[in-house]
Amino acid sequence: MHASRLIDKSPALWLRQLKQHPVISRLLHEQQYEDLAACLTNETSVKMLYQSLSERTRQMLLPILLRFGMGPFPEEQCHQFGQSNGSLAEVKITILELRRSGLLFAGRKSWGDRLLAFPAETFEHLIRLILSADPIKSVRKEEEDDAHVGIQEPDFQLAVLRFLYEVKMKGGLSITQKGTIHKRELQHLQGKKAFPEQDEWRYMPLVLGDHTASGYRPQEVVVLEYAHRHQLLKRQSGKLRIAEDECRTWLQLTYEQKQQQWLEMCRSYLLPSAPWLQCAWAWVIRQPAVEWFSAQGLFDLLQQAYDTSHAALKQEQAEEKNPPFTADSLETHLLLPLTCLGFLHLHHEEGKQQNQYRTAMASPKQVEPHLYVTADLTVYASPYAPSSLLWELFHYTDEESGCLHRKVTMSALQRAVLYGYQPEGVISLLKEGGGVPLRAETRALLADWIDMIGIAQVQEVMMVTFSHSFHLKMIQQHEPFRSSLVAVLHERACILEAEAWTEVEAYLGKHHCVSTSASSSSRLTDKPDRPEKQVKHVKESKESKVRMDSKDRKESKNRMDSKDGKQEESHTQGWLADRISLDRYTLESDCPDMEEIYSGMQDIPGMWLHQMRNYHASTVHKCIEQAIAWGARLRLKIKGEIMEITPRRLEASGPSWRVSCLLDGTPSSLFPEEWEQIQLILPGINDTTELTSEMKE
């Protein structure tokens, strides 16, 4: 889950404790960061928090990241991992320290089991801090980069923009009773190239897995999910339509803001489930945009990290099958999908087997002007042009060969007017976008077209069909409605101003009259002082007239609000499930203390902790039993040498007994006669104490 969401969901008591952490308290006091979320998402502050951890916690952190990924994961699994790879108490203290620093959050399921999760941005910064080596050295010259890669096109922004435009032009997408989009609607959008079509999209099913919505292609799922997540679509009258207000807000966002939105969505819904791929994701996302790397190079870096971790983790990763822990799996399950999502550049040289990748820039190149306009009104747009400018350009132009290669035409201007744009707006759009005044002949041509169209405005109208002809006569004879009656089509149908529909419907309802159908459209009306060039266009409704039976009337009534007659609207349901969310769980308001980890610590003799000593056999037996119960360690003096073990169990051996333990990570067994002195070591309590001269002797 993202840091901001975790903080919003966290109890106030827990947030107050976090702000008391020395590093966070100083950063907030010095006003280096405006809030707690900024402290957990900034690379510098995360590095400071990481450096404030104890050496023990820093050593344990990488195995936890490699084994469990971003989470959420059950704390019990983390304990089992600690038992198989070292001291259970060390793992518990590590979790405690990570939680107190804000690097790890905890929540509980309804039945009480605790879950742990790293904030998404924090996880990425931690991986980059620990795996900081560069896995490949680029041998190509920097000046060759642009020749091989070309300009970085923010495909997802163009894809969403084009998708929204095509949905608007079509008047919405018909949906089934289950809420899915009709196949013919998707085929229409495919014909309009409303979705990205890069070859790398064929690898996306490996990422989506069972999360793919039935009947949709991967690129359709991703674009639809983005539109849903930011409420750019709404359900209305059995169709998916664009949400005008939300779209206007989205269009005003900067490239960087939309890029951040895109990253957050992909992080939540497209993050690989395998922990090792999540670690690779984090490394790639935070990789500097100037460095090239290969799949094999990144895999070697991950392999090295697992090799230097606990032996059990290395063996467990070697047996990974979903997907296999290989460089090929890394490329097909992560790097190629990230390429089609726009996060990576791909470079392939003829004669070489390995692809090379580079992280895409978080900020666009400064490409100006945004538009290049030719004498015949052909327009070439920059992919980095503001979305609001491209949106307006789409309305004023027809597509030539690609959504960025367009042409201003008379029919395009007429269409723009139908959607509320003034024809004169195209002149200022081309001038501002192009950065230079238009040519005289270009301005003259546009002026002629504008003069022919007239200064138009859009007026919403509705075609209404009645069950009986006298219903229409009632409207004609009612004085308040006469001015709203645009045209009579025949004895049972008319075109009515949309603004008047609420009052008309209420009036008919009082007289127990119900219309057969009512569909909205638009018309162009000209300036009244230019009658010689008067133009009137009414967009015909394609809906057929069907006599309304009782079921139709019931559905119509359900679509109309009983108070104001407005059609009910709702935002769409999502297509993908959030993979890193803790929303279903209750975040904890406090951290466990030492008493919870070492229950009954006050009841043991203090000398067990303070120094190495020789005890009676029964006391040694009790000390070892307590160490096993807490998952703690023992410090032993064997033949004058000091060493530490992690006891696992006590075993009877004839008249004596022995302790089964881990010695330097290797399973071993020791008899009490083999050591001279013993000390109980509790991580977080006395594990950092120096050996005294008496101990060394």
Image: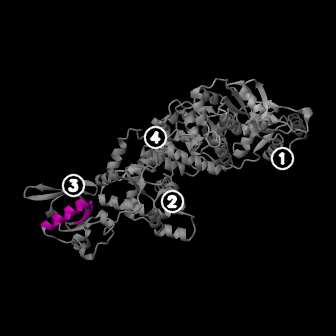
Earlier in the chain: of badge 1 and badge 2, it is 2
Magenta residue span = 617-636
Q: Secondary structure at mark 4?
A: helix
Residue 635, by quadrant, is: bottom left
Q: Secondary structure at mark 3?
A: strand
Q: CA distance from mark 1 to mark 4?
A: 51 Å
Residue 236 lies, in percent from the top left, at 61, 37
Write down the residue under mark 4. Answer: 327
Gap between marks 1 and 2 measured at Cα = 45 Å
The residue lying toward the viewer, choosing from 160 and 679, is 160
Neighbour tally class for label 4: few under 14, some 14-19, many 20 plus, Cα within 10 Å? some
Which tag, 3 or 2, sits closer to the chain's start? 2
Q: Would you say the residues marked 4 and 3 are in contact, meaning their CB atoms lie under 8 Å apart?
A: no
Q: Where residue 579 appears, x then y in whole percent? A: 46, 45
Q: Is residue 26 left or right of residue 241?
A: left
Between marks 1 and 3, how big is the CA–CA gap? 81 Å
Question: As displayed, is residue 598 above or below residue 152?
Answer: below
Q: Position of residue 71 (x, y in %)?
A: 42, 50
Q: CA distance from mark 4 to mark 3?
A: 36 Å
Is 540 displayed left or right of 62 in the figure?
right
Whichever of labels 2 and 4 marks the residue nearer the N terminus, that label is: 2
Occupied quadrant, residue 439: top right
Instruction: Please state the horizontal and vertical placement of residue 209, each as a whole percent of the image.
Output: 46, 36
Question: Relative to 328, does residue 622 appear above or below in the rendering?
Answer: below
Please state if 599 lies on the left or on the right of 301 as rendered: left
- For residue 321, say whether it is visible: yes
